[in-house]
Image: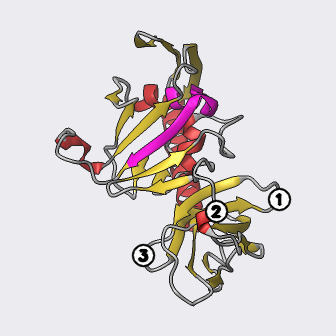
């Protein structure tokens, strides 16, 4: 009898959890807009960053398309603003707006960028790299010297990267396509699942030079990478040493269940090693 009651409570708990999870997705919203220049022409590859108003925390970044349009999806309720930057134009900051269950589709009024008045020919070639770059087959997030370079992890960077979606269960997809292949410095990592998640959470963002999000892998990559490839490029000569993470879990079903694990990685000039215990 007691076992039956525990089983029913377990099932009820799962149902309640799924309802809460579904509710969070239903409350997630879409924010979109269009960016034009002072001649009313669409601005392509402008960097659009979404910030939380309360503490100016970076939530997500995207690039405008060829039509000047951008969008952010699955944004939780809260108060936000967007910042637009593009070479040769003054930065633009929008008014704050509120995302809620009742207001879950935000159309930001047309954004018109104004010329900065600086001659592009006078800009030094040693200027800081843009936060996001677009190449023919990939997007590059330049983590070094960016707002994400300190106090966070590789997972924090990915959550804010364009086109990357980290689900509530911490699975990672590129533009909704699952089965993403992860690489470290151009080489496939042996980690997957929870081991990979733990590693990304333990890897300091300050040790990363850039993250390359390859949306259209060429023939040189394994066919399994058709969903996309995320290549984490570490800083040269600054990423040596050992780091890792320790995790535990406990769940109560019909019987209690507990466990844990340790993830370690060591890097030196000769290479790198990974351990999962």
User: Magenta includes 199?
Assistant: yes
Q: Residue furthest right?
A: 54
Considering the numbered disc 2 on the image, is that residue within a helix, a strand or a loop? helix
Considering the numbered disc 1 on the image, is that residue within a helix, a strand or a loop? loop
**Mark 2: few, some, or many residues within 10 Å (few <14, many ≥20)?**
few
User: Magenta includes 125?
Assistant: no
Give the residue at mark 3.
66
Distance of label 3 from label 1 (alpha carbons): 32 Å
Q: Residue furthest front?
A: 122
Give the residue at mark 2.
122
Q: Earlier in the sequence, mark 3 or mark 2?
A: 3
In this rendered view, identify the residue nearer to me: 137 or 258: 137
Considering the numbered disc 3 on the image, is that residue within a helix, a strand or a loop? loop
**Mark 1: few, some, or many residues within 10 Å (few <14, many ≥20)?**
few
In magenta, the rendered stretch is 198-213
Is residue 189 at all visible to an observer of this figure? yes
In this rendered view, identify the residue nearer to me: 99 or 149: 149
Residue at left offset 65%, top offset 55%:
59
Distance of label 3 from label 2 (alpha carbons): 26 Å
Give the residue at mark 1.
54
Q: Viewer-nearest of labels 2 and 1?
A: 2
Q: What percent of the width, then of the height, locates residue 203?
A: 56, 27
Q: Earlier in the sequence, mark 2 or mark 1?
A: 1
Q: What percent of the width, then of the height, locates residue 23?
A: 57, 62
Q: What percent of the width, then of the height, locates residue 189?
A: 36, 26
């Amino acid at each position: 009898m007691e076992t039956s009651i525990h089983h029913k409570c377990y099932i009820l708990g799962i149902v309640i959890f799924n309802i809460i999870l579904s509710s969070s997705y239903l409350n997630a919203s879409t924010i979109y807009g269009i960016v034009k220049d002072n001649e009313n022409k669409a601005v392509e590859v402008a960097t659009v960053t979404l910030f939380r108003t309360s503490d100016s925390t970076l939530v997500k970044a995207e690039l405008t398309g060829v039509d000047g349009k951008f969008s952010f999806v699955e944004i939780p309720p809260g108060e936000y603003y967007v910042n637009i930057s593009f070479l040769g134009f003054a930065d633009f900051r929008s008014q704050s707006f509120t995302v809620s269950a009742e207001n879950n589709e935000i159309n930001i009024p047309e954004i018109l960028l104004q010329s900065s008045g600086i001659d592009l020919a006078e800009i030094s070639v040693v200027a800081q790299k843009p936060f996001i770059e677009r190449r023919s087959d990939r997007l590059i997030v330049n983590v070094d010297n960016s707002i994400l370079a300190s106090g966070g992890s590789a997972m924090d960077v990915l959550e804010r990267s364009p086109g990357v979606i980290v689900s509530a269960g911490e699975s990672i997809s590129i533009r909704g396509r699952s089965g993403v292949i992860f690489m470290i410095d151009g080489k496939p990592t042996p980690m997957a699942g929870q081991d990979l998640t733990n590693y990304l959470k333990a890897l300091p963002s300050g040790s990363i030079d850039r993250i390359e999000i390859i949306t259209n892998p060429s023939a040189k990559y394994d066919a399994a990478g058709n969903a996309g490839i995320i290549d984490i490029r570490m800083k040269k000569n600054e990423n040596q040493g050992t780091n890792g993470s320790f995790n535990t879990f406990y769940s109560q079903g019909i019987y209690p269940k507990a466990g844990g694990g340790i993830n370690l990685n060591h890097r030196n000039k000769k290479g790198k090693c990974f351990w999962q215990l």
